[in-house]
Amino acid sequence: MDEVAGEKLRGKHPVEDVLYNRLMDAIVDKYLRPGQHLNEVKLAEKYDVPRSRVRRVLERLRDEDVVVFELHRGAFISRPTVAEAKNVFQVRRHLEELVVSLACARATSKDIAILRDNYLREREAFEALRPNVNRIAAEFHFLIAKIARNEILEQLVGTFIRRCVLVQSVYEKKSGILCLSEEHREMIDAIAAKDSGAAIRMMQHHFDHIVASLELTKERRLEKDVYDFLTE
Amino acid sequence: MDEVAGEKLRGKHPVEDVLYNRLMDAIVDKYLRPGQHLNEVKLAEKYDVPRSRVRRVLERLRDEDVVVFELHRGAFISRPTVAEAKNVFQVRRHLEELVVSLACARATSKDIAILRDNYLREREAFEALRPNVNRIAAEFHFLIAKIARNEILEQLVGTFIRRCVLVQSVYEKKSGILCLSEEHREMIDAIAAKDSGAAIRMMQHHFDHIVASLELTKERRLEKDVYDFLTE
DNA sequence: TTCAGCCATTTTGCATGCAATTTTTGTTGG
DNA sequence: CCAACAAAAATTGCATGCAAAATGGCTGAA
């Protein structure tokens, strides 16, 4: 999940990467929720970096559509609408069809081992009710993308995974925390067998289940909830 | 091709959009070729804007992978490698399969009319040997993306179209300037008939032909060619 | 003549500071 | 007591200026 590192040519700075990763992790772990305002000077003070760097990082996040800038109001964690949510998942689903197809053709036994390791970690985290299940599950999809051996696709899928986390952060039904790791396991088997037809079908079903776990009928506004917790 | 306009919320500025569009047009029209260095102060003087704005625009182009920054050397039009070229086209082809599929389902008669108009303009420009054929042809693909009515997909396809122009700018075989407008016409017919199966196949063949028109066997370095014309 | 090493120039990277705008708070009048 | 208005505080947007780094030219020695 760290396609950020190792970019010396661009005007990137290790300090910025730290802040970038912290913020992104906070978003993926759903600690920072959509609608949240990100104060530049406070972030700058907290991490002891000049404000210009904070701003640079926020702009980087904006370019990934993870935060939104409002004129003279600053940066906010972006709050996808229902339409955006559907569109993002539609595109991601399609992208990952290509991903598994390529992964089936190119996966080595070592790749499969890495996937199986991820499965075990996800299962373990799920059973122990650890909060980082989501991150491990997201990593699974990113690992397949790496196996596809198309760097542009890999990077693209990475950004879509993060955007989808944001969507889930807003629209996920709290009730049914369904276990999706078994679907991951089945997909690994299909990839290992190089059965791309089966793998693509599994991926489609997998996304059907994920989207089904979302409440995409009405808009939700999270930032209000912060104050509305009294009125409900 | 202008998904830039109308974004007041982001910290964007009309003056920046002008420069952005100028640069992007220059790239799409293959006036600015890959490897070209972009001097910040000269651009700033030419368009009479502070350097900070030029820089902002260049960073925006960098985020679309159209320019590359090298540390303390500045911005260059990015020069895709053979591997990148293949990967970009692979992803774009797959994305546009989804695009036509959706377009078939959602195209109105007005949409079809817009496409046919584009076809006529492309054909006309082709026969008149006008240099803007490429831009019109690129616009065709963008128009279909708009018809698909998925804004995220639309925007994404837009960036991939531009990256592919860059690839063609480097790797296109000079010899056979083949006429692709007929394939566009056939695709319009398929979309009008709402025959998504046929439309997808057409799109695939279309991309086969485009990729076939590229010389993707060896790396090409354009900026060297400027000087290598003596040695060949 | 040629090449290595050094200095000057050019160009970018980035921190600082000011101006513009929003948000909040305090006050006054109804 | 509440609403409307005004002033102040906070926060962002952005231009300017300086420091760091790379390129190109120049001198001197082999």
Image: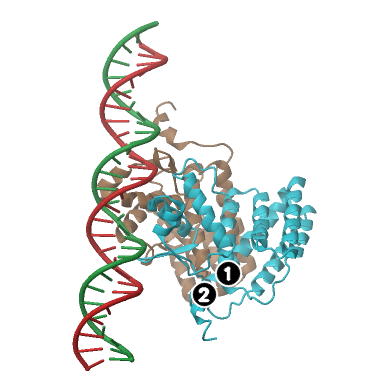
Chain colours: A brown, B cyan, C green, D red
Above or below — where is A47 with respect to B76? above
Instruction: Give x and y (percent) for residue B40.
Output: 40, 59
Instruction: Give x and y (percent) for residue B46.
Output: 45, 55
> Toward the viewer: A15 or A108?
A15
Residue B129: name its quadrant: bottom right
Residue at position x 49%, y 62% from top? B65
Mark 1: which amino acid? Ser
In the structure shown, which secondary structural element does the residue marked by tag 2 occupy?
helix
Mark 2: which amino acid? Leu
Residue A114: name its quadrant: bottom left
* Mark 2–mark 1 distance (CA, rounded to whole Å): 9 Å
**Mark 2 burial class by Cα count in 10 Å: few <14, some 14-19, many 20+:** some
- Residue A73 left/right relative to B157: left
Identify the residue under disc 1: B169
Above or below — where is B11 with respect to B224? above
Q: Are marks 2 and 1 in contact (CB under 8 Å)?
A: yes
Residue A223: name its quadrant: top left
Instruction: Give x and y (percent) for residue A181.
Output: 50, 58
Do the dots labelled 2 and 1 sit on one chain? yes
Q: Give whichever of discs 2 and 1 has the lower sequence position.
A: 1
**Mark 1 burial class by Cα count in 10 Å: few <14, some 14-19, many 20+:** many
* Residue A38 visible, this angle: yes
In the structure shown, which secondary structural element does the residue marked by tag 1 occupy?
helix
Question: Which chain does tag 1 point to?
Answer: B
> Toward the viewer: A49 or A183?
A49
Question: Which chain does tag 2 point to?
Answer: B
Identify the residue under disc 2: B222
Instruction: Give x and y (percent) for residue A25.
Output: 38, 53
- Residue A129 left/right relative to B34: left
* Residue A206 visible, this angle: no
